[in-house]
Amino acid sequence: MSDYYFGTDLFAELDRLQRHMSSRFGAFPSSIRSSRLGAFPSLNIGVTDDAIEIVAFAPGIDPSKLELSIDKGLLTIAGERPSARAASDEGARAYAQERFNGTFRRVVELPQQADPDNVQARYVDGCLLITVGKREASKPRAITVQ
C-alpha cells in the first residue's frame, strides 16, 4: 500500500503533499507566484485601469546594457551587473559578498489584456520602470442603466 492517500479535501491534500516534499527536498516558495530566493532584479507588479506597472529594482546597472523584449505574452528583462570590485583589487579575497553580480534574466508572464505594442520603459534612481498599456477592450467602462 502506498504512503500517499488522497482524501476528499483536495487543498488539504495538496498542502500535506507540499509539506512532505519540503521535508524531503528542501523548502519551496510559499506561493506558486513567489520567485526563487535571491532572484535579481526584484520586481513589484501592479495594475491600474489603463496599464500594468512593473518596477524592477536594479541599482548599479548601465541602462544601455539592459535588454527588454516581449514575445507571446512574456516580458523578458535581461542584462549584466558588473562586479563592484575595482580592477586594482585582483588579489583581494572577499570575506562576504551579498551583492549580486553577473548576468541575469527575469521573465514575467503578462495578463491577456496587456498590449505588447504599447510599452514604455525608463530607468530612474536604480529602478527600471516598465508600463505596459492595456488593450481598449479590457479597460473598465461605465454602463448607463435605462
Image (tube, helix red, strand yellow):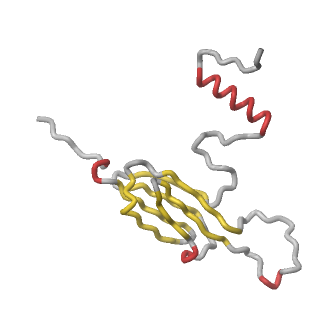
Which of the image's four quarters has the C terminus? top left
Pick out the residue farthest to the bottom.
Answer: 88
- The answer to whether residue 67 is left or right of residue 50 is right
Residue 25, image x and y in percent? 78, 38
- The answer to whether residue 96 is left or right of residue 131 is right
Q: Which quarter of the figure has residue 14?
A: top right
Instruction: Please report the residue visible at 71 percent of the width from the left and 65 percent of the height from the top.
Output: 100
Residue 58 drawn above or below residue 12: below
Q: Which quarter of the figure has residue 132?
A: bottom left
Q: From the viewer's side, name the closer residue of 65 and 92.
A: 65
Q: How many marks?
A: 0
Q: From the viewer's side, name the closer residue of 94 and 71.
A: 71
Instruction: Please report the residue visible at 69 percent of the width from the left and 26 percent of the height from the top.
Output: 16
Residue 77, image x and y in percent? 55, 63
Residue 7 drawn above or below residue 58: above
Residue 34, image x and y in percent? 61, 45
Residue 9 drawn above or below residue 96: above
Q: Which quarter of the figure has residue 56?
A: bottom right
Instruction: Please report the residue visible at 15 percent of the width from the left and 36 percent of the height from the top.
Output: 145
- The answer to whether residue 70 is left or right of residue 135 is right
Which of the image's four quarters has the N terminus? top right
Q: From the viewer's side, name the closer residue of 104 and 46.
A: 104
Instruction: Please report the residue visible at 59 percent of the width from the left and 22 percent of the height from the top.
Output: 10
